[in-house]
Amino acid sequence: MNKFIVIGAGPAGAGAAIAASKLGEDVVVYEANNAPGVKPCGRGIPVIGELPIRVPRDSVYHEIHGAIMYVNGEFLFEMKGVLSGYIVDKTLFLESLIIESGAELVKNAKYIPSEGVVKANGMVINIPGSGVFAGGHPYYEGEKILAVQYRIKTSEFDDSDMLEIYFDTEILGYFYVFPAAPGYVDVGVGGFKGFRDLKRLLDAFIAKDDRFRDRDRVKLEGARIAVGGIKYGYIRGLVKVGEAAGFVLPLTGEGIRPSLLSGYEAARAIIEGRDPIKAMDSMDISRAIRIQRRILEYVKDLDPDSRAELLKSLPMEVHAEVSLGTLNVGRILSSLASKPRVAAKLLKFIVS
Ligand SMILES: Cc1cc2nc3c(=O)[nH]c(=O)nc-3n(C[C@H](O)[C@H](O)[C@H](O)COP(=O)(O)OP(=O)(O)OC[C@H]3O[C@@H](n4cnc5c(N)ncnc54)[C@H](O)[C@@H]3O)c2cc1C
């Protein structure tokens, strides 16, 4: 029996492996690194009804029950009860999902697109042109921003169930404080600036905060994030899924859930003889990415003060609908009943 091929053991590859295994395929996942999930990441996964997986309990560092939001240093609100999710050990999360699905995971196995082969442990394996390509942001052809983060040694966040988000309208991005493995916290920033500027801003952000200033910074890491919206494509007959195809929410940079969903849906479609691109395109998360991209394009044209005004004008429930990509029109309208002009503007992005 021909194996179902998955290139890349990130969230998109895991989603594809799970779907294909569920449908009875013999699945092999080729991963270039010696472990999945080593790319820099905040590892936050919001839990919203549609996720087709069970988050492995032993991979959970923290259960998250809310977020505290700031705009340009000014407190905006504490979002409790409208956001829940997990911070995970991403390597364990992905490895458990792939292995539990029954798929074979081959590490140190790099696919070479120009040759159509995987090179692993001195062997060269021919890859037939059917399956998914989930190699992440290096293969994405749209707009990308950079995010950099420090891992800081402190046990102050060990019992934390909150995220902290500090919007910065100058860089059109945000600083974040995410609890991490016990004894650590990740403090990062993503936005429309280069590495030097982001690092300088992050150093300044840390220097201002008593909780981090004098703590050990054990690691500085960074990576690009695809924020240009969905760009479908194939690599030698393998359909691009996940961040390689732009499955990231452009306003928040959230990519684990969208990537996993895209891999899952594409694999199902391939096996059932449907068009994987049409299948991915009809997902709710694809609609959310398109809407967030339209909003991002609009906000890019505003000056920093107008961006701040817009952020402050939205009630907490609307922030949640937009940032999580649920975008329920009824709920947005009722939250904005006293602000018909803001509601009309937002609806234009949602329905156009
Ligand atoms: C600093 C930072 C913080 C972030 N924080 C969050 C967050 O908190 N929550 C969230 O949802 N998203 C976050 N993201 C985004 C998220 O990390 C990605 O969008 C998501 O991991 C994309 O999943 P993927 O499977 O498409 O790609 P990836 O996770 O990049 O996985 C691709 C895999 O393919 C492998 N690979 C690549 N090329 C080949 C090849 N030729 N052959 C074989 N294997 C190959 C790679 O080694 C990798 O393991 C963050 C991103 C950054 C940069």
Image: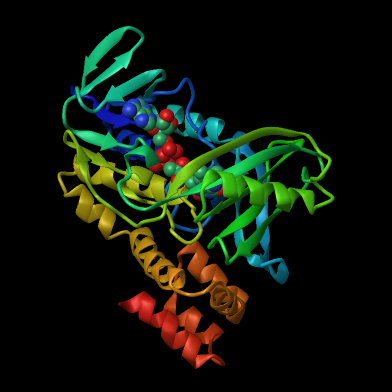
Query: Residue 37 vs residue 9: left or right?
Result: right
Give whichever of 13, 151 is nearer the camera: 151
Q: Is residue 104 above or below residue 66?
A: above
Please indicate, yes or no, whether residue 157 appears anywhere in the rendered image.
yes
Point out residue 43 in the picture as x, y percentages from the top left corner: 57, 43
Image quadrant of residue 152? top right
Which quadrant of the picture is home to ligand 1? top left
Point out residue 199 in the picture as x, y percentages from the top left corner: 62, 45
Residue occupying image coordinates x 23% and y 28%: 113
Query: Residue 112 vs residue 179: left or right?
Result: left
Give whichever of 95, 310 is nearer the camera: 310
Residue occupying image coordinates x 37% and y 76%: 349
Please indicate, yes or no, whether residue 8 appears anywhere in the rendered image.
no
Residue occupying image coordinates x 54% and y 37%: 40
Q: Is residue 263 above or below residue 297?
A: above
Which quadrant of the figure contains the N terminus? top left
Q: Residue furthest top?
A: 122
Q: Is residue 181 above or below residue 106?
A: below
Query: Residue 324 vs residue 109: left or right?
Result: right
